[in-house]
Amino acid sequence: MPKIINNNYFIFPSFLPFILFLTTISSLLLFPLLPVNGFEAIPFLQIDYNFYIRLAQCEAKCLEKFSSLNKRIIIAPTDSQSITDKQFNQQMAIGSSLMLENICKQGCLDSDSPPPPPPQSPSQSTFLQHQLDTQPTDAFVLGQQFFKQSSNKNPPPPFFSSSFGGIIRPLCVQKMSSSSIPSSQNTFSLHQEKFETFLIYEDLVNEKIKKENLRFVVCWRSRKLLIKDEEQKEEEPQWITASIESSHRFKVSSLRPGLLYQFKVQAVSPIGIQVPAAFSDWIDFNSLIYGSGINTKSLQFYSQFNSDYGVAAWVSWRLNEVKKLENGIQTTKPILNARLRRHLILQNEDFNNTNNLNIQNKTIKSEEELFTEKQKSSFVVFPSCKLHIEWANKSSRASDKFELDGSDGYLLTNLAFNSEYWVNIRAEYNNSNNIEEEEEEQLTTTLFEGNFLSMKCLQVFGFGSLECKPEPIQKLSIFPFPTNNTALVKWERPLAITNVLLYELNIEPIIRSGDDLNIKEKCKTENRLNTKIVSAQANFTWISLPHEAVCEFEVRHTLYDLLGREATAHLRFIFTPSSTSEPSSTDTQYSLALRQFISQLDISILALVCVIVLVPITALIALICTISRRDTRQKTKKRTNKNLYLLKSIIK
């Protein structure tokens, strides 16, 4: 038998979920729930706005009451239950709390029904069974009480008196497929195209509201789209209360082309209205259906790293100037950050405040004043609500399908360090009746594309970490000493020197195809020892060089870490000994000196030298050509005049 641990907690034995499931099914048949997954824009459906405000507050109270129940659920243990059974009962108990929440909402809808008769006082043996039987009844009565406690008049507090409480914007607009249109409307709208959209309500000023138990009352209205130079007087359209939404993202279907739509969202908390209603601008969804205002090159990438996702990158298609300004004013004081953010938002939204006031007083606007989402570069409206993203580098390729949720971005995870990735985002259409046409359209509809370089391992773990591949040493330099035929090789010691096993130095003479055979033998290092091992704590070493000829060498400095991985740095230099037993030819010395001079030059210096040398030479050649051309013309002219003079004299 299960035991009662504390009267303040709900005790769920294994058979309770089945009882509550049957109870909830019967209640749903008697009191169907209001739609919370979106609504149809039906103009002849009128609902009392004040009633929906009270109902939304009641549902928010039910959500607040039973969402906290999940944290206090205790499963009564039995010796015969396995771990799997206990986990299953735990999940079922959490599900039963959601059932009680739904029953509470039914009490909000049916607040005028008489409460059920009070049960008889149970005996000690049947106390637990009595508690289980009365829980659905108590939840229903609780919903009735919540609705009666809600008030018709719920003005926002004084500190929320600003006319701007949030924004409403469309995430996507797409054509409705025949399967998504109800059967009752198929015969009515066979030849009429309809749209569906996902809207999102965002409160930019009050960030705490996102964490509360809220319900959103959605209203809408529509008017005809006026053609340019068309004057027509029409009455102010009335608001139509549509639904109570449980999420700030909701779906609206049965939108018709040729109409402008405006939406209003009122957020309602368990204590009532805390913020003013948000108004959208007049939206022409027909102008957004094809996504012609999307710039395919406007992707932004933000690299990051954490223990859960590894190397990641946030792919953003939202060009929000407010966010860019926020990133530039970050300070170490949270209070100052909040004040600066609020100041920027209020400053940047003055234009929106004016628009919202004009919407309430004036609905007939000219074409220049008409709002379209193309004019707002901060947000992107997609021609499809389902997207396909693909990312690839030189060695791998991955893809995923997702639905827009208002985050205005996608997180790429488990990327490779220091690798260039190409990203492509396409639209996934679901309204095509022909599968072949749909596939062809998907392949050619690219909304966004771009590339970025992922984070380097050094940015995460630091230089010299064993989590990263070893990096070659920095500032490798060589100082020759011709007097004793040696050279000093120096480098900068790594910061994580404890992860370095040793260094290996390799000296090789550079022998070119045109060099003399005698030089090849003379440029070999002493005792033919080309490799030298150096300890990890050192940052310099001496090398011995041949003293018989002028030679060019290449030094390869290899670093080995504790895992045996290597990283190599290269450097070339020319060594000229102070005394040679057999003097080398002058041409060889000049050739080596020229090589050394060129090898020490930077690319920018070489480009500058070429410009300095070639520009005067080109100008001089052009001047010579101009002078010679002028002299040629003068000589030709004199010869022509002389011939004419002779011809005239002959004629006379």
Image (tube, rainbow, N blue to C red):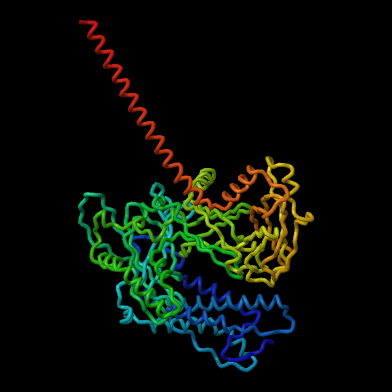
Task: State left or right for residue 461 relative to residue 115.
Answer: right
Q: Which image quarter is the C terminus in?
A: top left
Percent from the top left, x then y, of residue 560? Answer: 71, 64
Q: Which image quarter is the N terminus in?
A: bottom right
The residue sitting at the right extreme is 527
Task: State left or right for residue 32 relative to residue 494.
Answer: left
Task: State left or right for residue 438 relative to residue 125.
Answer: left
215 or 161: which is nearer to us?
161
Quarter of image, res 478: bottom right
Q: Residue at x 77, y 57 (%)?
A: 529
**Is 363 drawn above or below residue 286 in the view shown?**
below
Percent from the top left, x then y, of residue 176? Answer: 44, 53
Q: Residue at x 74, y 84 (%)?
A: 79
**Is 220 drawn above or below residue 636 in the view shown?**
below
Task: State left or right for residue 455 relative to residue 279.
Answer: right
625 or 459: which is nearer to us?
625
Q: Can residue 352 be seen at all in this image of the molecule?
A: yes
**Is 338 drawn above or below residue 521 in the view shown?**
below
Q: Residue at x 38, y 68 (%)?
A: 218
**Is 599 drawn above or below residue 636 in the view shown?**
below
Percent from the top left, x then y, of residue 266? Answer: 36, 72
528 or 425: which is nearer to us?
528
Q: Can residue 183 be seen at all in this image of the molecule?
A: no
Quarter of image, res 57: bottom left
The total of numbered circles placed on residues is 0
59 or 332: which is nearer to us?
332
Percent from the top left, x then y, of residue 308? Answer: 61, 69
